[in-house]
Each structure stands twice: as structure tokens, then as C-alpha cells.
Image (cartoon, coloured by chain):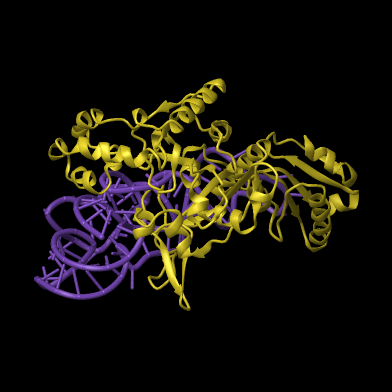
Amino acid sequence: MKIPTEMIRAVKGTRDLLPPDTAVWNRVETIAREVFRTYNYHEIRTPILEETQLFARGVGTETDIVSKEMYTFDDHGNSLTLRPENTASVIRAYIEHRLDQKPGVQKLYYMGPMFRRERPQKGRYRQFFQIGAEAIGSDSPFTDAEVIEMVCELLTRTGLSGFHLLINSVGCPDCRPQFVETLREALKPVAASLCGDCQRRAETNPLRVLDCKIAEDQPVIDALPSILDNLCGVCAPHFAAVQTFLNDRGIEFEVKPRLVRGLDYYMRTTFEVTHGNLGSQNSVLGGGRYDGLAESLGSNVHSPGIGFSIGEDRLVMTVDQGEAEALDVFLAPLGDAALRHAGSLARELRQAGFSVEVLAGGKLKRAMELANKLGARYALILGDDEIAAGEYSLKNMKSGEQRRAARADLAAALVD
RNA sequence: GCGGCUGUAGCUCAGCUGGUAGUAGCGCCAGAUUGUGGUUCUGGAUGUCACGGGUUCGAACCCCGUCAGCCGCCCCA
């Protein structure tokens, strides 16, 4: 059937997730919840809408996200925004509900849709899904290592292999500004030999030059000073400790001094996981420490934190594609009386935990075809013979073997 | 926001230098088989050739615009 042009379609950059793909999503989310549980993380659900100011102050006005990628609208004089990420919201909720008064480190996880008005591409949607976690209330490098370990565990458990963990330290307000100046000075004599973008970045945001992917620029960039040689007396030992703790856990990583992140709130530890077959959107997750975020959102309580978010759309792409959840039994009633009988039988089987499909009418041949196409493990035939005998014909669709089974024995017969 | 490529049946795709769409594969429906699927055989249905305009005697094909998807840039999950 042709879909008329005036037919309403999903808006650009959004998409429908259909079965059997949704089974993969559910599997990933179930694994994530299980991993989070074992690390004593608990779920938080924040609104999809926030005051625009939250992201402006939290993520940073100068970032691309805030300056040009947000879904912002006026709500009777109040500027609201569809959340482009969730860390700012979680910290807002942490402050608002005085979670700093609760005992211990607050370990929170979330999963849900985020919105950014970017040009859609494979693995980049305007409504996309993230699974993330935040540990708030600890500035210990031990926490950094535990968070990174947890995320690796999560990825491994989903069946993802061949991913690559990159870590770095981006310093803190005490040492980063100084490094940026050092970098700016170092760039002055060489900027002219770099690409156009880098020449611009050398002025506006020298750190971004480090992230340049142009091959010809690499020799020059490699020769630039490294932030890791310019960390302060607090950041340097912190980063060293994170690496020690990761090594203790047998986690493989690569220190990439040129890893810079796009959100203003990151400081000290930052990390990223990439995967080969994602094209140019090769980053599956990103995270880092954000010790000053709570204060920049107006809290007078120092609440150091570290977290990450996984691009669920991208993770799902790299994970094995799923099959539809198996159907346990297909009921094929022959005739009106049998149909009524099938209704009560289906209810009984469902209450026993089996998935059941009942054909509301049609020939037996059609019923068997459908049972096969739906991937049913068993077909149960209810004809006059069966009802009179008080036994059903139970057919194993895989082996083709068929036998009689009494109602009382059905549950046991279906388990095999 | 910028650049490139693509858009034909439910899906994957043929379709010559413009001559009026394909016995294509898969899928779907029906029959061969009045209570038995998966293999096989036979038959059948479905397209405003993305949309709108232009050139032409004639456009799926050429031109312009729009929309959508993909790929790259920017940036990021």
C-alpha cells in the first residue's frame, strides 16, 4: 500500500523501534540494570523537560550543545528545553532533594531519551537514548576506577567485544587555564601550517586543536605540549591513582592526552569508549568527573561527582541482532465450541507463565502454517475428537512429533 | 549549519542513448492436501517509479525545487 504524502510520519531524526529489535533494547537494558544493582546503583527518573537555564549553566553556554543543538521553546514566558543530556538534571535533583544529607556516596543510574537538534546520521538521532550513571559525593580516584570498571563490565555483558577504552585528565580550574595559555603560546608559531578549522580553534578554543583528525596536522599536534605534563599537585596524583586502580582490576586502557570533551563541566578524569564498526560516530560512551557542577548550579554544598552515559542507539547497533521472543504455544481450535474451550485453556496456560496465541478461526492447515511462521514451540489442536476425549493433540513444531496430552499434564509437557 | 550520494512492489533490487514498469529474488495470499506446518509445485494480489514543477510528441530516466535516508564536515552518546 502506498503511503500518501499527507500522511503524518515520524519527525526528522526520530524513529520507531519495532519488534524484534525492541527485544535487543530490552536485553541491553536488563543487563544494565543487573550490573548497576551489583554496584549498588539505584535508578533515578528526572523530567524530560527542564528550565533552559539548567543546561546553560551546567553544560556551558559556549558548547555546541547549548549554543545550537537544543530543543528550546517558550512556555508562557518561561524558557524550557528538552534535555540534551541527563547529568545536569541528576545534579539538579540531587541538590533539590538534599541527597547530600543521605549517608554515603549517592550512586544513581538512568536510562531514557535525550534530544539534540543535530543533522541526523547513522547512530545520531535527534531523539536518542542514553543509559548512564553518576556517583556523587566522592572525589576519590577509587570511585573513578570503580565507575570505569562498571561500564566495562556492562559493555562486556551485553556481548560487545573489541571496544577500546581511552582515558585522560583534563585538569582542574587550578591548572587548566594555565595549560590553555601554554598551548596558545605554543600554537602561535605553528598555527599557520594547520588546517583552517585548527587555525580558528587556536584562537577560540586551543584544546580543540588536540582533537583534530586531519592527518597532515598530526605531526605538529603531536609536538604540542601535553596536558599530562602540566597537571597541578592535586590532579597529577589523582590521575596516577586512577591508573593504578584500573591496573589492579585488570582493565585495559589507553591514556590519550589529546582526549578532550565537549562539555564544560568535566575536570580531572575523562574517558571514552570507541568501537570500530560505528563509522564516524565511533564513540559508544563518554564520561568524566565534574566536581564543580553542583556549585555552578547554585549549590553551596561541594558535591564532587563522576559519571558516564552510553549511547544506547549505538550500543544496540554493535550488539548481535535479536530474534523475536519465542512463542510457547499456538492453540488451534476447530469450531465454535472449541474456540470457547480454547479461551479458558489459554487463560490457564498464561497464568502458568506460557506465552499463548489463539487462532480465532480458520482451517487447521492455516493454523499450522501460522504456528510455524510465528515460531511456536508447540501447536495444540482442539477438535471435536480432543474435547470428547478430554485430551488435546500436542505437536512439537520442531521435531514434528505429535501426541495426546490431558489438560492436567499440559504444563509439564510444555516445559520440555 | 555546510558538502557529496541515493529515493522503482511489504523488503532487496533490475530497468540500455528519454519510447510509457519486472514470468526478478524474498515475503504475503490461495490451491494441490474437507483435521496437520516446515520441502516442493501451481496460481494470485500489491506500484500516482518519494513529492511538486519544468523541458519534450513522449520522462522512472534530463533540469529545478522540496522532503526523506545514507555518507562525510562540525560536534558529540
Quarter assignment of residue A66: bottom left
Height in image: A254 above or below A279?
A: above
State the purple chain: B
Count of residue discs: 0
Q: Residue at x 65, y 36 (%)?
A: A39
- Across and down, in percent, residue A88 comes to 51, 54
- Across and down, in percent, residue A21 comes to 54, 47
Quarter assignment of residue A116: bottom left
- Quarter holding the N terminus of chain A? bottom left
Depth check, front residue: A341 or A62: A62
Residue A394, visible in the rendered structure: yes
- Colour chain A appears in: yellow
Residue A14, visible in the rendered structure: no
Height in image: A282 above or below A83?
A: above
Q: Residue at x 54, y 25 (%)?
A: A245
- Across and down, in percent, residue A261 comes to 38, 43
